[in-house]
Image: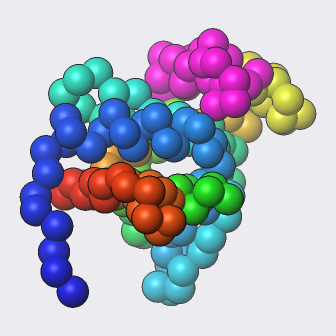
Amino acid sequence: MHELPRQELKDVAPAFVEMAHQIVWASAATVDTKGRPRSRILHPIWQWDGESLVGWIATGPTPLKRAHLNANPYISLNYWAPSQDTCVAECKVTWAFDDETRTMVWDLFLNAPKPVGYDPKIIPQWTSPTCEAFAALRLEPWRLRVFPGSILYGQGGQVLDWRA
């Protein structure tokens, strides 16, 4: 299999964010404390400032999630659309429990345009950004891949791939 030429983050991140925010929901895979894969569907939001890309996930800090991410602080996110558009982010994950960051993430989701934006209060346990049931995960990608489905249909497009 031939490898794609190395691409710069500035050339991949905007296309990744555009596709991810259109698809919205991602299959997320982590590894549990025994080295077994664990997957779920999550709703990340991404911030691209022209130089760095950071993702955020609003979540409940359950003991199971905390144990898994403390043992293996990485996540793979795979977005897929019926058009066969796919994009992947493989990331280092850190918990954000401080009130300032949790409030920023809460407001980020609250104020983002739909479909990526939503009111976090739709989750009954999340009464405010500083409640015990709410936490944020910070995603720092080390690999991004963007694969437009148009390629599969002979309609052109370009696979984009970046690695830190």
The stretch in magenta equals 98-119
Residue that appears at 67% across and 64% down: 40
The picture quadrant where one finds residue 159 is bottom left
Q: Decide which of 138, 24 is in the foreground and name it.
A: 24
Residue visible at 34% across and 33% down? 14
The magenta stretch spans residue 114: yes
The quarter of the rendered structure image containing the C terminus is bottom left
Query: At 67% from the left edge and 59% from the top edge, which residue is drawn?
Result: 82
Quadrant, the N terminus:
bottom left
Question: Residue 144: x, y in percent?
Answer: 32, 54
| Outermost front residue | 154
Q: Position of residue 22 (x, y in %)?
A: 59, 38
- Residue 12, image quadrant: top left
- Taking the image as shown, residue 96 lies to the left or right of residue 42, namely left
Give left or right: position of 105 versus 89. Answer: right
Q: Is residue 48 left or right of residue 61?
A: left
Q: Nearer the viewer, residue 134 or 150?
A: 150
Q: Is the residue 11 above or below the residue 145 in the image?
A: above
- The answer to whether residue 76 of the structure is visible from this angle is no
Q: Is residue 108 magenta?
A: yes
Image coordinates for residue 67, horizontal then vertical, percent: 54, 65
- The image shows residue 131 at horizontal and vertical percentages of 71, 26
Name the residue located 37 percent from the left edge and 39 percent from the top edge: 15
Tell me if residue 23 comes above or below residue 33 in the rendering.
above
Q: What is the total number of numbered labels drawn onto the structure image?
A: 0
Q: Nearer the viewer, residue 56 or 100?
A: 56
The answer to whether residue 20 is seen in the rendering is yes
**Colour convention:** rainbow
